[in-house]
Image (cartoon, rainbow, N blue to C red):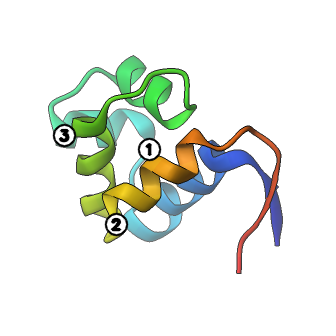
Amino acid sequence: MKIHGAAEIIKCRLRIEAGFTIKELAAHLGRNPSTISLVIGGHRKSLPVITEIARLLGEDPEELASLLAQPEGEVSMT
């Protein structure tokens, strides 16, 4: 399956695996939905938020931060 960008990967995983929308994730983490959206979209760097999201998804925070730092483009999910 190919999708575009890290943000889409994270959004898919949040919805499918964790059962969260961005608003629900924000409420769960005690954060503003716009902050979550900006971080997931790679428009704002926030290691604390990235760490919280990574832990929720069972991922390594450093790997997630690296993924979010990549330029947007087609990414393969395997």
Q: Residue 21 carries which label?
A: 1
- Position of 41 with respect to 33 (left or right) is right
- Within 10 angstroms of label 3, few (less than 14), some, or many (20 or more) residues? some
Question: What secondary structure is marked by label 3?
Answer: helix
Q: How far apart are marks 3 and 2 (CA)?
A: 17 Å
SS state under label 2: loop
For the point 62% across and 56% down, the residue is: 9
How many angstroms separate mark 1 from mark 2 (CA)?
Answer: 21 Å
Residue count near mark 1 (Cα–Cα under 10 Å), binned few <14, some 14–19, many ≥20:
some
Tell us which disc is closer to us: 1 or 3. 3
Q: In which quarter of the image is the C terminus?
A: bottom right
Q: Which amino acid does label 1 sit on?
A: Thr
**Residue 20 picture location, percent across and down:** 39, 52
Q: Earlier in the sequence, mark 1 or mark 2?
A: 1
Q: What numbered label is drawn on residue 60?
A: 2
Residue that appears at 71% across and 72% down: 77
Q: Distance between the residues labelled 1 and 3?
A: 12 Å
Question: Could you tell me which secondary element the residue under label 1 belongs to?
Answer: loop
Find residue 24 and report its horizontal and vertical position in percent.
32, 40
